[in-house]
Image (cartoon, rainbow, N blue to C red):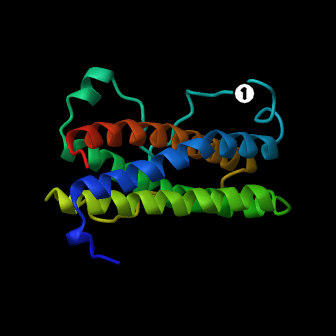
Amino acid sequence: LSSAASISPAESISQAYSLALYMQKNTSMLLQTYLQYQGSPFSDPGFSAPELQLSSLPPATAFFKTWRTLDDGERLSLAQGAFLALTQHLQLVRDDQSDLNPGSPILLAQLGTARLRAQGLLGNMATIMTALGLPMLPEEDTLGLVAFGASAFERKCRGYVVTREYGHWTDRAVRDLALLKAKYPA
């Protein structure tokens, strides 16, 4: 294997883009599986609660003009920060679900896989940033204080927001990386 320093920007962007596309194919399945195991109202047909947010997880939504005018470093830093937060949040959700739904190996496996893929994309982004000479974000505890006494409903809501935002950030990463891929063709 070659070291990160010897990988061209185009090659690292292509690898990250391929992973993000692969992740994108599985995000809706993760969200649907998650909702199915939570019971009503989460498992009710058409359930959606876009107003639910977590202060420790940046939302993926942005005004198009704002997003489009970001430079490569800003775009990658935002995505890197989001996927760092997502890896930590996905672990918390998996821990919550181990307690709330211990008999759900499919859900627990999907959450674990999503976390590993988010970590992989985070690593790919670090490689891209290094290849482009961009500064890296320091790793930090994005969760902050976690209410371990949260009710089952609060933990289910938290998990819903995390799995939903994982999908939104994956979609955004695909768009971010498509822009980079066009800028640095192989």
Name the one closer to the observer, 171 or 37: 171
Q: Report x, y in % for residue 156.
A: 70, 46
Check disc 1 and report its element: helix, strand or loop.
loop
Residue 136: quadrant of the picture = bottom left
Q: Report x, y in % for residue 112.
A: 63, 63
Please, is residue 183 above or below residue 65 in the view?
below
Please, is residue 104 above or below residue 173 in the view?
below
Query: Residue at (45%, 62%) from the top-left corner?
Result: 120
Q: Report x, y in % for residue 37.
A: 80, 47
Q: What's the residue type where badge 1 is placed?
A: Phe
Please, is residue 51 above or below residue 74 in the view?
above
The residue lying furthest to the left in this view is 133
Q: Is residue 111 in view?
A: yes
Query: Residue at (67%, 46%) from the top-left corner?
Result: 30
Query: Residue at (74%, 50%) from the top-left corner?
Result: 152
Residue topped by disc 1? 47
- Does residue 146 appear to the left or right of 36 in the view shown? left
- Crowding around mark 1 (Cα neighbors within 10 Å: few <14, some 14 to 19, many 20+) is few
Name the one closer to the observer, 15 or 107: 15
Q: Report x, y in % for residue 96.
A: 69, 59
If the image is split into quadrants, where does the N terminus sit?
bottom left
Residue 94: quadrant of the picture = bottom right
Q: Is residue 145 in view?
A: no
- Does residue 41 appear to the left or right of 22 in the view shown? right
- Does residue 123 appear to the left or right of 133 in the view shown? right
Query: Residue at (54%, 42%) from the top-left corner?
Result: 24
The residue lying furthest to the right in this view is 103
